[in-house]
Image (cartoon, coloured by chain):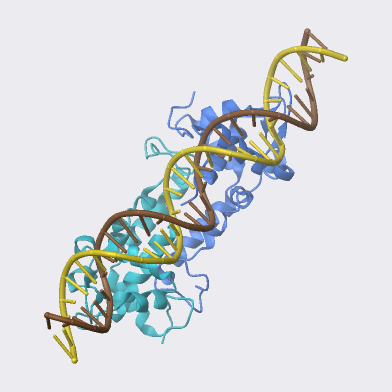
Chain colours: A cyan, B blue, C yellow, D brown
Amino acid sequence: MFSKATEYALRATIHIAKKSSKNNKLGLEEIATAIDSPQSFTAKILQMLTKNNKIISSARGPNGGFFISEKARKLPVRAILEAMSEDDVLEKCVLGLSQCSETKPCPMHSQYKSIKQQLINLFENKTIQYLAEEMTDGITFISNKKMI
Amino acid sequence: MFSKATEYALRATIHIAKKSSKNNKLGLEEIATAIDSPQSFTAKILQMLTKNNKIISSARGPNGGFFISEKARKLPVRAILEAMSEDDVLEKCVLGLSQCSETKPCPMHSQYKSIKQQLINLFENKTIQYLAEEMTDGITFISNKKMI
DNA sequence: ATAATTAAGGACAAATATATCCGTAATTTA
DNA sequence: TAAATTACGGATATATTTGTCCTTAATTAT
């Protein structure tokens, strides 16, 4: 559904929201290991998410790293997709028709309509913080290795 | 959601199901024009769909072209995804975690679960013929140009 | 038989996504 | 101030997707 870049972005953000705080920033290496993603590529993605402090924040130097503000925690998950320029996936026609709409539907439109709306609702109504909290029950995971 | 190749495959198949018959085969040029896709690339995709007559059938020579059997019309839309080796999109974890499951869920799993199931149902329960029939009402379209 | 038509299929080209590497800048600690 | 740490950002490499081109094979009509 999403590109690898966006998958890593979602996982990284959730991980940072769960594990970091203002005085406990997470380094690139820790993050890439935790979410099981290629380190250098993850660095690029974290940069995108950091642009204008939109999703996550960063600090250089010793004890530097990535963290997330209280304000950003309240952002809808869709904000991550937007930062990755991939939120159009949510609205997109299944057949890839740019003009597909209610008045000019593709043959899948009426059947897909409600699924699409639920997808949009999911990404717009659930916040980054919500997903981080889903991780606190000890059952839910973000890597293919068990969380500790 | 799907690759361009799969989008073209879906559109081409629906178009062929709507317009072709055993004695009215459709040529590559006609199809590519109708679904607004690059011709040569579409040729490759039609070849994939034709392999073993799985989705569509073809005939060479004058009055040759592509058509679809009555049997193939009854296939679920998912069969097109399978022919394009892209049906895993339906089952895939939103975060791209290979081990995400009911017993080892990612933080989005419980929220996405029912959406995923509806997606699977859509592609498994609706047939190619069904989508072709959706096109017969004069309102539904398959290209970004109005059907005639 | 020959010519015309049309899909099949291989080779290649271009664009995009994924990924790595390395020097630089900022910050902290000693 | 010097050294260590960590993110930033540019350049480059690799893989995949998307797309084109051309020759061949099959079929039909003349």
- In this rendering, position of residue A59 left or right of residue B66: left
Foreground pick, A141 / A83: A83
Residue at figure coordinates x 35%, y 50% from the top left:
A88
Give the vertical position of B145 relative to A120 (above or below).
Answer: above
Residue at figure coordinates x 43%, y 28% from the top left:
B145
Residue at figure coordinates x 61%, y 47% from the top left:
B80
- In this rendering, position of residue B42 left or right of residue C9: left
Foreground pick, A26 / A97: A26
Q: Which x, y percent locates residue A112?
A: 45, 49
Q: Which x, y percent locates residue B54?
A: 70, 45
Residue at figure coordinates x 31%, y 79% from the top left:
A18
Can residue B73 be seen here? The reply is no
Q: Which x, y percent locates residue B120?
A: 54, 58
Foreground pick, C16 / C29: C29
Give the vertical position of B32 relative to B53 (above or below).
Answer: above
Give the vertical position of A15 relative to A97 (above or below).
Answer: below
- In this rendering, position of residue D12 left or right of residue D28: left
Residue A17, quarter of picture: bottom left
Give the vertical position of A49 relative to B130 (above or below).
Answer: below
**How many numbered dots are placed on residues in this image?**
0
Can residue A103 be seen here? The reply is yes
- In this rendering, position of residue A62 left or right of residue B69: left
Q: Which x, y percent locates residue A60?
A: 21, 74
